[in-house]
Image (cartoon, rainbow, N blue to C red):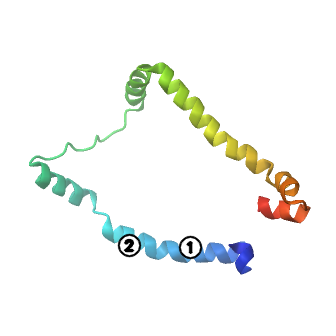
Amino acid sequence: AMYAFGLDLGTVMLIWSGLLVPITYICWRLVPSQFEYFERAKKSLGMPLPRPPKDIQVCRMMTRAWAILRHDMCDHVASGVALSAGFAFPVFYASMAAPYGKELFGTKKDGDLLSD
């Protein structure tokens, strides 16, 4: 879009920031507060939701997470490997975008345009 409209990065970032301000305000107005959320849940369920804990117990949380991950270990390892590969391949491709574009389109300028 930057190339098509002749915009530089600073202008695009300014437009992006200008869009974020009203979007943030709209979200702030539409999303209920925690108090409103708990009150609505109490009304809907007929009983109050338990309050979140006051402190975070990292060791206890990690122990419980590990206990869950131990079940179906092969499935969890396979999922982890698949996700890792899925996130790694775009990084490898991004590092080779300019040479790939040069070979694909025939000119260095087109290769550089693809990498931008």
- Mark 1: amino acid: Ser
Q: How far from the left and from the top, in percent, is residue 58?
A: 41, 32
- Seen at 84% across and 55% down, the residue is 104
Pick whichever, 88 or 108, lies toward us. 108
Which of pointers 2 and 1 lies earlier in the amino acid sequence? 1
Q: Secondary structure at mark 1?
A: helix
Q: Give the labeled residue for mark 2.
A: 26
**Rendered-image quadrant of the C terminus:** bottom right
Q: How far from the left and from the top, in percent, is residue 12?
A: 65, 74
Q: Is residue 93 visible?
A: yes
- Mark 2: amino acid: Ile
Q: Secondary structure at mark 2?
A: helix
User: Would you place residue 95 above or below residue 4 in this image?
Assistant: above
In the rendered structure, the answer to whether residue 52 lies left or right of residue 68 reads: left
The image quarter in which residue 65 lies: top left
In the rendered structure, the answer to whether residue 103 lies left or right of residue 44 reads: right
Q: Is residue 8 visible?
A: no
Tell me the number on the disc at residue 17: 1
Q: How many marks?
A: 2
Q: Residues within 10 Å of mark 2 (few under 14, many from 20)?
A: few
In the rendered structure, the answer to whether residue 30 lies left or right of residue 84 reads: left
Q: How far from the left and from the top, in percent, is residue 68?
A: 39, 24
**Rendered-image quadrant of the N terminus:** bottom right
The image quarter in which residue 9 lies: bottom right
Q: Residue furthest right?
A: 107
Q: Tell me the distance, in whole angstroms, between the alpha carbons under discs 2 and 1.
A: 15 Å
In the rendered structure, the answer to whether residue 78 lies left or right of residue 34 reads: right
Label pair 2/1, CB-CB below 8 angstroms: no
Q: How far from the left and from the top, in percent, is residue 80?
A: 55, 31
- Seen at 78% across and 61% down, the residue is 114
Tell me the number on the disc at residue 37: none
- Seen at 70% across and 80% down, the residue is 5
